[in-house]
Amino acid sequence: MADGTNGPTAPGRARAGSEQVAGLGAQRERPAPVPDADDTLQAVLDATRALLWIKTPSEAAAVARDLVERLGGSVVPAGTAGAETLPVDVSFGVDGPSLPAAEKSSLASMLLERHLPVFVRDVNRALELADQTSRFAEDAAVDALTGLPNRRVLSRALGRLRPDDTVVMIDLDHFKSINDTRGHEQGDKVLRVFGHTLAATVRAADRAGRYGGEEFVVIVSGPEPGPFLDRLRAEWARIRPYEVTFSAGAAGGSEPRRALQAADRAMYRAKRSGRDQWQWATEEDFL
């Protein structure tokens, strides 16, 4: 007759204290008691709701582990797997494969078998959607051809100009002739290489992007753009696929629209003055 200490345990109900789970080869704490039907439903709903907020595999693995434990099981490394484990990896690539485990033929085991496979499929789908969202956000911010921030991002950066920032407008000289004589594929190559050159030349404190067509904008942190433009010109002359030069205009000031327009006017004045040079904006350029 059972005395409550050494007698049999009802199926699926965990004994108090610590005991060895057969086949796992390690002494560890038994999981919490198996939930009733209402608790089971609530655990699955909570875990599924949590998938709306995950962004990384680590977060997904944490949600899965919590669900396994709320259903009365535990998570063990795949290398220690025995008959008590289910062949459902809940690591999602984090720290090696791991499997849910529960005493064989117990209620916890049945709950895990019923709910875990569907939940893992939901997790994988949630991670796919999170990755898509991340890529969509990146696509919305990055110019696909050059890899630089696009005009939308530049507009936000211009809206945060500081008084000592300098706006530089850059335009490739005679770019249309590349498209006309060598084809748009080679024109795209010129833009791509120039974008990479620009990204490699700016300092960490500077911000650069493609404004549109063959125009690029750089926000130089500081009042003197000369050293940056000298570096860019030297590196571009070394790496450019064709002998394409660039003209630039520079303007200071904390008013984004006026600074950008002034830099643009200075850049066109540099072009009219012979190209392959840069000029400061004058007071008239701000009017």
Image (spheres, helix red, strand yellow):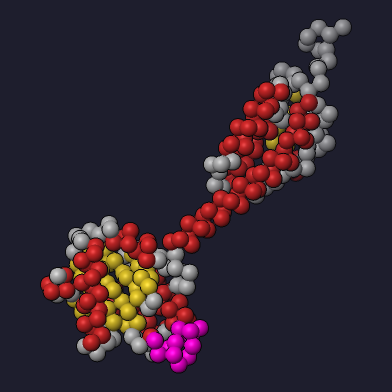
Q: Which residues are magenta?
A: 176-187
- Magenta: main secondary structure equals helix
Q: Look at 43% across and 79% down and name the residue there.
A: 191
Residue 246, by quadrant, is bottom left
Q: Residue 22, image x and y in percent?
A: 81, 30
Query: What quarter of the picture does the C terminus occupy?
Result: bottom left
Residue 49 against residue 209 in the figure, above or below: above
Which residue corresponds to the image point at 69% horizontal and 43% vertical from the top-left?
Answer: 120
Q: Is residue 213 left or right of residue 70?
A: left
The correct choice, above or below, for 189 with respect to 116 in the image is below
- Residue 192 vs residue 72, the one in the foreground: 192
Occupied quadrant, residue 70: top right
Nearer to me, 285 or 190 = 285
Say whether residue 77 is visible. Answer: no
Horizontal relation, residue 191 to residue 171: left or right:
right
- From the viewer's perspective, tell me whether residue 104 is left or right of residue 51: right
Q: Quadrant of the N terminus?
A: top right
- Res. 2 in view: yes
Left or right: residue 140 versus residue 204 is right
Quarter location, residue 16: top right
**Which residue corresponds to the image point at 78% horizontal and 39% vertical from the top-left?**
86
Residue at (18% x, 64% y) in the render: 253
